[in-house]
Amino acid sequence: MACSVVIIDDHTVLRDGLKLLLSRQPDVQVVGEAAGFPEAFELLDRTRPDVIMLDMVLDSDTDGVAAAREILRRDPRARILMLTMMDEPAPAAEAFAAGALGYATKNQPSAELATAIRTVAARDRYLSPIISQAEVDRALTAQTATNPLAVLTAREREVFDLLLHGKTSIEMGRELFISARTVETHRARILHKLGARTTVDLVRLAARLGLLGPVRRAYD
């Protein structure tokens, strides 16, 4: 089964080049492209791709990391692969802290980029091999002080966001295709990692981080 991809980048030539390169991969299918927002949101709602390939810097007014946060706020299950010219640990850590699953550089071979897409589609974390994982981990640890949610895995972040919507364990299990018991395990780990006692504590944390947005405040 082909992995569907949406490319969000403000450079037409780059988008065309990516589409050409990825067309050579039999299991990767580009299903849409956008130069920026808000057209990207309409595209994502319509296509629901397996992977969103997002430029780290869309234009002078749009921060790719902020865009990633907004995408994940709208759809916590979105899988984002950041694509950038920056091959340094700090921006990679910033992308992961925002909830991206992958961080690839534009100077990687096309075969390696396809590997990055497959890895993110499988909900595993991907980091460009030219960047030190140890240095990214150190930078991520430093950023955790300002973004506590960076310690959560992708699945834990999904459970966290569904908790904010007032979902029960059974409802979350149905949405995530896991058992209610597994949901409870994730919930316990989230509470432990974030130093919280109850779901109410998690909602208060989300409020401090400005993550509640339009979600239903079931615990107010």
Image (cartoon, rainbow, N blue to C red):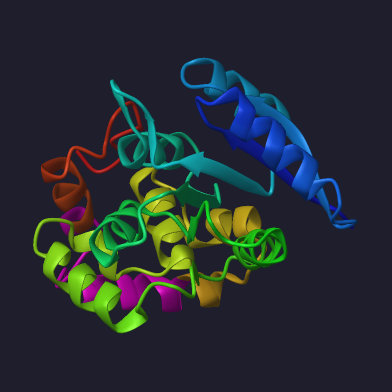
Identify whether 200 is placed above or below 18. Answer: below
Q: Which residue is depicted at the point 86% across and 52% down?
A: 24
Residue 200 is left or right of residue 171, and the answer is: left
Q: Nearer the viewer, residue 205 or 218?
A: 205
Residue at 65%, 57% in the rendered image: 174
The N terminus sits in image quarter: bottom right
Residue 191 lies within the magenta run: yes
The spot of residue 215 in percent (x, y) is 35, 32
Residue 48 visible from this viewpoint: no
In the image, is residue 172 part of the stretch drawn in magenta?
no
Left or right of 182 on screen, residue 134: left
Left or right: residue 129 versus residue 46 is left
Q: Residue 141 in the image: x percent, y percent?
A: 18, 73
Q: In which quarter of the image is residue 90?
A: bottom left
Between 94 and 219, which is closer to the camera in this rendering?
94
Instruction: Give whichever of 208, 110 is nearer the camera.
Output: 110
For the record, the magenta segment spans 184-201
Seen from this angle, which residue lies furthest top? Answer: 39
Residue 160 screen position, x and y as percent = 37, 57
